[in-house]
Image: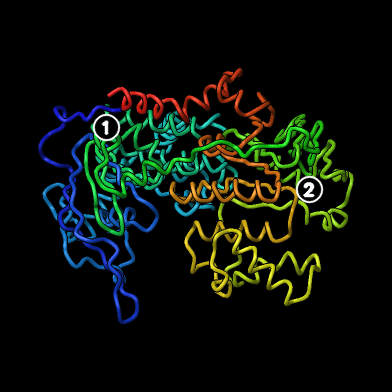
Amino acid sequence: MPSTQGNEMTNTPLISIRNLSVAFNQGDSQVTAVHDVSFDIQPGQTLALVGESGSGKSVTAHSILRLLPYPVAHHPCGEIYYDGEDLLKASEKKLRKVRGNRISMIFQEPMSSLNPLHTVERQINEVLALHKGLNKKDARARTLELLTLVGIPDPEKRLASYPHELSGGQRQRVMIAMALANEPELLIADEPTTALDVTVQLKILDLLKELQQKLGMALLLISHDLNLVRKIAHRVCVMYQGRVVEENDCTTLFSDPRHEYTQQLLAADPSGEPVPVDAGAKEILRVEHLKVWFPIKKGVLKRTVDHVKAVTDISFSLPQGQTLGIVGESGSGKTTLGMALLRLIDSEGLIECNGNRLDNLSQNDVRPLRREFQVVFQDPFGSLSPRMSISQIISEGLEIHRIGTAAEREQMVIQALQEVGLNPDTRHRYPHEFSGGQRQRVSIARALVLKPKLILLDEPTSALDRTVQGQVVELLRDLQQKYNLSYLFISHDLAVVKVLSHQLMVIRQGQVVEQGPAGDIFASPQHDYTRQLLDAAFAIPNTLNKATTAQ
């Protein structure tokens, strides 16, 4: 936990925001997204903006560098002072000198910020050449240094990589390296670790703290991850419906939250125990010696010279009504394992679901059996067709499997929506009309309507706010208990895994390093890597909680 560093910081703020409002034109009307927000960021300080999606955090931060869609966006009032000048009134020439040089920004989704046609080396070199005037040799050396700093393995090999060849976590690290290239005075980090594993989060946080001390760099952190905020922030501003409802130093805010909304946020961490299970439950899924290797082909004849060993020799058994939590860092093989189990990619080894051998079946033969095992993906927006209504999305599986008449399918859709806590009257609306949490409920309803025995949940809560996460976790628990569902729960969020999982499997580089009853592993992990994951996820918050209790 960082100290408040009040004595070490100067009295002159680096950034001073006063009475900032942001409005967006919508036809003849306008919507105000930010109302009279004021705060200061001191040199070397980390200020966190926290709140749920739609609270105005990102809009406030984007205003600093005037990155909003003007003239649709405008500022009815407010000033943002940096270096003695109001940035809202500064010329484009002045802003170009500030953007990416003195003030840098890391965005939540790295693929929207990285050029898919340029290599990692070229993208970072361009930043260094533009602002630092480095030649190719010096830029390459600095790029390697930056990639090493942000924890990219084998950085020399990654210089020639394109963004699509990197994992989500690696892409985020490349973007952080680009933002830090010019040693900025202020780094605006918009959900910088959402896509990262807990161990990588810690490395990035340590790096940012180290750079703060070295450069006196300030950090504006936008996040809904309160554990992250707790570890790094000096001060916290809580935003709700476009307003700052509470501001305080980090320690005080977490130990003594004053506003009702802040209290609600702090109480939203997943809690409880996995649902009770029947000790004599029959086996729903059996996997033995599963292997997924992707060939590396080279030369004119495309001979196989090596393999990417995504999954190697994984075996487990899952009884009905239980949850198997599958954890590991980005690139460890979690999602590949899930795709292999669903027979969406080729694999070797035995896969038996509900008494049916799947591993030796063709795609056509597997298709009728897919009714029994469904999947819910990480990104509910990306997995729902924007051109289909909610009713069409949910009933699509029923139509494919030729279940019921049109009227019967309509009733099944209504029932599925009721099961996941959505109003059936909304079934004729489209995905963009729903919030992230509601879209994820639609994804669950789509899986549920086919009455499956097994559901693969691939990071189903990582894109959601903490309060919404808690609701989705409760929903999954209720459905599991009601229908005796089995879950394969893939996640890097160990707090969620802990409250849902009966069994736990820890994967690293495609291999199982530890597996067994989840409660035993969380209480007493045997492998160093597991301990590393748990320490990164729980150590600091637990320490804080104990300290708070002691007071």
Question: Which tag is nearer the camera, tag 2 or tag 1?
Answer: 1
CB within 8 Å, label 2 to label 1: no
Numbered disc 2: secondary structure? loop
Counting residues from the N terminus, which is met first, the one under dot 2 or under dot 1?
1
Nearest the eye: 458 or 13:
458
Q: Where is residue 487 in the image (x, y as percent from the top left)?
A: 67, 44
Q: Position of residue 146 (x, y in %)?
A: 42, 33
Height in image: 453 above or below 27?
A: above
The label shown at residue 489 is none
* Residue 440 in view in this figure: yes
Q: Which residue is drawn at 16% across and 48% down?
A: 16
The label shown at residue 251 is 1
Q: Alpha-carbon neighbours of circle 2 within 10 Å: few (<14), some, or many (≥20)?
A: many
Q: Residue at x 74, y 73 (%)?
A: 408
Numbered disc 1: secondary structure? helix
Going by the numbered disc 1, the residue's amino acid type is Thr
Q: Is residue 498 left or right of residue 206?
A: right
Height in image: 540 above or below 310?
A: above
Q: Mark 2 points at which residue?
A: 343
Nearest the eye: 532 or 82:
532
Q: Which residue is drawn at 80% across and 45% down?
A: 346
Q: In this view, does 69 lie to the left or right of 41?
A: right
State how far apart marks 2 and 1 are (Cα): 49 Å
Nearest the eye: 435 or 518:
518
Q: Is residue 526 left or right of residue 191?
A: right
Q: Position of residue 345 (x, y in %)?
A: 76, 47
Q: Position of residue 20 (x, y in %)?
A: 20, 58
Going by the numbered disc 2, the residue's amino acid type is Arg
Q: Classify the position of the C terminus by image quarter.
A: top left
